[in-house]
Structures are given as C-alpha cells and as structure tokens.
C-alpha cells in the first residue's frame, strides 16, 4: 500500500503494525527515505512533513504541543487508533511529548538519535540560530565534516558513500531546507523540560543510538540517557554508526525496531533497562 492523503500531506506505505515516523529537524520525511523503505517491509509506515512546513497542508505552528497535536491529526486522518511512534533526532522529542499527552494512542515509542534530556545549544549553535539566513549556508557547509568519520565506518566503500551523498542531494533538491524553521525548532528544545516528560511515560520504549565516538551531531551518551529515565526502556547501539544509522544502515535500524515491536507484542513490559549491541 502506498498513497498520499489529500486533506494533509501524509505518506502511507507498507502493511503490518502501524508505525508513525516523525521526521528530524529538517522537517521533511524525504531525508529519512532509506529508513522508511526498510521499515515498510514489516510495518505500515505513516509519515509526513512537520506541521510548520508549507508542504504539511496544515496550519503552521511552532510549539512542541502543536507538533504533538499534528501526530494525533495524522492518526485521525488515516483512521488508526494506536501506533508505534518513532521519532528521529528532533522528531524524537516530538514523539516523546505526544506519548505523554496521548498515551492511549501509543503502542510503543522509538527514540532514534534524539537530543538528550539535558541538550542545550552550544555557543556556535546559538549564534547560528539567531541569524539562520546569514549563517545557514555555513552550517550546511560544515555538515560533511561532522559526518565524515561516521560515513567511513558505516559505508566503507567509496561507491556506497557516493550513492548516499547523491540520495541526500536529491532529497535536498526535492525537499528544500528552511534554515529559519530549523533554527526555530532547535531553540524550541533548548532548555525544554524533557526529563519531566520521561517521568510521565509508561509506554514500552526503544532508545536507539550510534557509537559515542561517531556521533558529532547529537552526543550519543545524551541520547542514551533516556533509557535511564524512562520505565520499560531498551537501549540499542547500532555498531559502526553515529547519528545517521537510520539512513546509513537502514536495514539494521529497521531490524532493531522490528525485534522490539515483536517483544512488545509477545510479552508485557518489564521494569528496567535492557541493552543490546546490534552488529553491522
């Protein structure tokens, strides 16, 4: 199954247990395309542009609660009562907020490379966020340097890295970035009371991170901290990846989510943290 809903822009692919994928700080699902394709082998994947994007088809709002309400609107639109909510990076903060506001609609929660509960803008990021149109091109130019080590580990072949770069450039062409909206999203979670949301969460949760030495975008150990704050949490580190494991090794990422979903169905949640290191 693959179609788009007309009243708001929703991508609906695959079959199986419903899984809502909340995009990262870019605001567009296109950048997570490899993960969506792999997840759709096992799940009915629902995804969309964030509600402050012109492509979303809904009113532009910028608060965590507004982003969370958008998820509920999407579920209503596709007539799904409950789903696995999977947030990628910034999308994980939205997924977490939705899961605390509407627990009755959450089968389970997946947080992938999500900024940690104590995440703050550093000095350089704060300067960029105050003048995003001026500094946005510099931010974009620095990105290859921040992910170079990760890409060499996750994609050892130069051919694989070129293919990856081409897919991302194609996404950039079809889903242009707004530095202003990205900066507003970053400011939104700078100092947010995320830890409080963690204490309220009851849904089985999978926390996925890469290796600490390879994530130069969001500190991996900060992401892993969610596993100690959320009941019924499982922590999985994807070997040979950093921040981008969901798109550099999408089959490994999807397999981790699928195993977790199987556990949720087959057994009741257990208190405490279980940690698995997934091989490449």
Image (tube, helix red, strand yellow):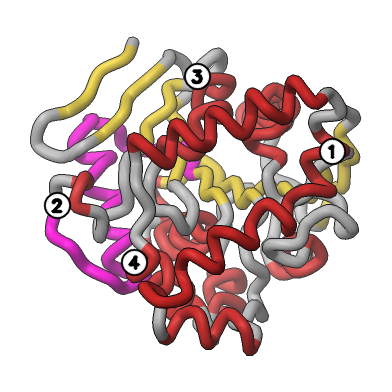
Q: Which is more N-terminal, label 1 or label 4?
A: 1
Tag 2 secondary structure: loop
Q: Is residue 236 visible?
A: no
Which region is colored magenta? 58-85
> Could you say which is closer to the camera, residue 218 or residue 105?
218
Left or right, 236 with respect to 29, comes to right
Q: Which is more N-terminal, label 4 or label 3?
A: 3
Name the spot of residue 170 as percent of width and height, x first.
45, 31
Residue at the image point whose x is 58% and y is 20% from the top: 38
Q: Residues within 10 Å of mark 3 (few under 14, many from 20)?
A: many
> Could you say which is closer to the camera, residue 90 or residue 214?
214
Left or right, 205 with respect to 194, comes to right
Q: Which is more N-terminal, label 2 or label 1?
A: 2
Q: Which is more N-terminal, label 3 or label 1?
A: 3
Tag 4 secondary structure: helix
Q: Which is more N-terminal, label 2 or label 4?
A: 2
Q: CA distance from mark 1 to mark 3?
A: 27 Å
Which of pointers 3 and 4 indicates the residue nearer the eye?
A: 4
Res. 152 mark: 1
Q: Is residue 87 visible?
A: yes
> Could you say which is closer to the camera, residue 113 or residue 107?
113
């Amino acid at each position: 199954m693959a179609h788009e809903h007309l009243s708001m822009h929703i991508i609906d692919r695959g079959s199986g247990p419903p899984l809502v994928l909340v995009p990262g700080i870019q605001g567009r699902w296109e950048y997570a395309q490899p993960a969506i394709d792999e997840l759709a082998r096992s799940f009915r994947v629902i995804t969309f542009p964030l509600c402050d994007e012109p492509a979303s088809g809904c009113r532009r709002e910028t608060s965590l609660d507004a982003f969370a309400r958008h998820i509920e609107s999407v579920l209503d639109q596709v007539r799904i009562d409950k789903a696995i909510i999977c947030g990628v990076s910034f999308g994980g903060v939205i997924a977490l907020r939705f899961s605390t506001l509407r627990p009755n609609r959450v089968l389970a929660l997946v947080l992938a490379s999500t900024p940690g509960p104590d995440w703050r803008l550093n000095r350089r990021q704060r300067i960029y966020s105050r003048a995003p149109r001026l500094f946005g091109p510099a931010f974009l130019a620095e990105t290859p340097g921040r992910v170079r080590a990760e890409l060499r580990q996750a994609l050892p072949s130069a051919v694989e890295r070129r293919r990856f770069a081409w897919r991302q450039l194609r996404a950039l062409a079809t889903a242009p970035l707004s530095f202003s909206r990205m900066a507003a999203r970053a400011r939104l979670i700078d100092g947010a009371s995320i830890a409080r949301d963690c204490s309220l969460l009851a849904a089985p949760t999978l926390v996925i991170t890469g290796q600490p030495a390879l994530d130069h975008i969001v500190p991996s150990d900060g992401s892993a901290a969610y596993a100690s704050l959320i009941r019924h949490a499982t922590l999985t580190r994807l070997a040979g990846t950093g921040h981008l494991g969901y798109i550099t090794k999408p089959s490994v990422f999807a397999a981790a989510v699928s195993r977790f979903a199987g556990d949720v169905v087959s057994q009741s949640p257990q208190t405490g943290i279980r940690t698995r290191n997934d091989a490449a």
